[in-house]
Image (spheres, helix red, strand yellow):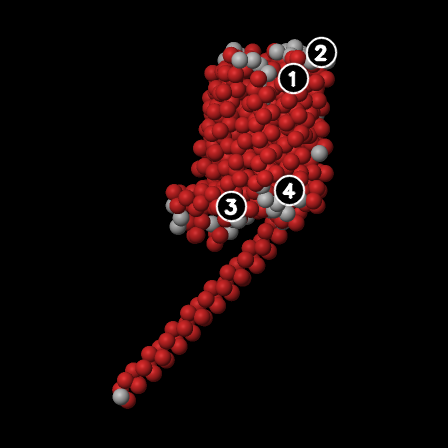
Amino acid sequence: MKFLSGVLQSFVKFGRRVRRKIFLSIFNLTRAMKEFDEHYEEHLRRIYKWNVFGLVLSWVIWAPFQYMTHPYFQLYAKELGATPVILAVISFVSTITLGFSRLIGGYVADKYGRKKIVVYMTALVSSSYLIYAFSPDWTWLVIGAFLSSVALMYQPALWSLMSDSTPKEKRGKIFSLYNFLPSIIASFSPALAIYLISRYTLVPAIRLAYLLTFFSGMTVVIIRAVFLKETLLREESLENKQLSFKEGYKKALNFIKENLKYLLLIDVVISVAASMSFLTAYYSVYFLGIDEITWGYIFIVSNFLGILVTLPSGFFIDKIGRKPVIIVSAISQLFGDFLLFITPYVTANPFILTLVAVSLTSIGFSIWFIVINAITTDLTPLEFRGRINSVIGLIINITASITTLAAGAIYSFIGPNIPYLVATLTIAYSILLIVLKMPETK
């Protein structure tokens, strides 16, 4: 009996020691995690201003030259032999490649960090503009689009860097700053393209613009290498780099399914509408009869109006919430696409209707870019952001690439304005989804 009693007491003492060790282990682990979190928050507070400065400065330098070519790419491609269907094919190649390259880029961003991939791939994107500049025909534009989209695998890393460097209470304002300052400077750069076109004609002028984009892009490479700071500490990266590519994305997909499915659906629906209206420059010049120079002025005015709303929209996103602002964004896009649809049936000056329509679309998308980034960042933990952005981007890009092919076919074989009717109906559906399914995350 004494023997059994002694054994029982020994087990009790052993159990107490085990419980004590477990308790101490949990306590030490909790304390270590708390210390790491505090250290990490301090790290982000210390570096975020450098990243905001580096990103804004790089866009201030690069965006004006990129914007020079934006309103004229479709017209440039047409001069090199592209039809609406070929433009859709170029867009398809670019978009589908971008989706899969982002998938790789998102994994790299979460496993190895943000900065290096941003710097190296910025150099490759810049180099792709040389192909655009020296293209003898439209087939080279496909090669340029493919190379550029491969290089843009850095976008998830860039988005993650932006999100990591943005305190939640300042998220709307800082995302507005990212968009506002570079865009306000770039908004008038198409005026330089207009000047070059009036002096040298379209093709030589756009070739020169692409060359300038290349040189400014290489300057941005240096700026990003110097100013950007890594936001993903070694301890935070994909469980000390033990997570495989497959496992990493499996976790990301599960997270999207559980937390972001309606947000993703809304984003996809809006991307369908945007892809349906991707031929607006071609439609305006070659169907509505607006000349190249006038189209440039429409682009400048509409883009400037879109930029003007970015700062106040950032304020309202933080002040009244994300949901009311995103509804306003969708409504603005809806009316813009509807006006483009009805323009051929209206006796009014097509210049005025096109200006109003493209301006409403520009305003809507400017707000959309800010608010969708704010909502996604609200709902996504830091360690998932690269992969989440990649998965969402891939789904949207696959959808958009297929939609652009459909839009090119509809434009050519059914009617040039019919894609805008499809876009209008699609955005109406997205508004219904926003009202009924999207949560407020403020």
Identify residue for label 2: 347
Tag 1 near tag 3, CB within 8 Å:
no
First along the sequence among labels 1 and 3: 3
Task: Tell me the amino acid under the disc marked 3.
Answer: Asn
Q: CA distance from mark 2 to mark 1?
A: 10 Å
Identify residue for label 1: 342
Foreground residue among 274 and 269 = 269
First along the sequence among labels 3 and 2: 3
For label 3, the crowd category at 10 Å Cα-Cα, with few meaning under 14, some 14 to 19 and many 20 or more, is few
Q: CA distance from mark 3 to mark 2?
A: 48 Å
Task: Tell me the amino acid under the disc marked 1.
Answer: Ile
Q: Any mark on residue 259, and which?
A: 3
First along the sequence among labels 4 and 1: 4
Task: Tell me the amino acid under the disc marked 2.
Answer: Thr
Tag 3 near tag 2, CB within 8 Å:
no
Q: Any mark on residue 322, and which?
A: 4
Foreground residue among 125 and 378 = 378
Q: Residue at x 37, y 80 (%)?
A: 13
First along the sequence among labels 2 and 1: 1
Q: Residue at x 52, y 16 (%)?
A: 410
Numbered disc 4: secondary structure: helix
First along the sequence among labels 4 and 3: 3
Left or right: 316 as drawn, with respect to 215: right
Task: Tell me the amino acid under the disc marked 4.
Answer: Arg
The answer to whether residue 157 is visible is no
Q: Residue at x 57, y 31 (%)?
A: 429
Which quadrant holds residue 17? bottom left
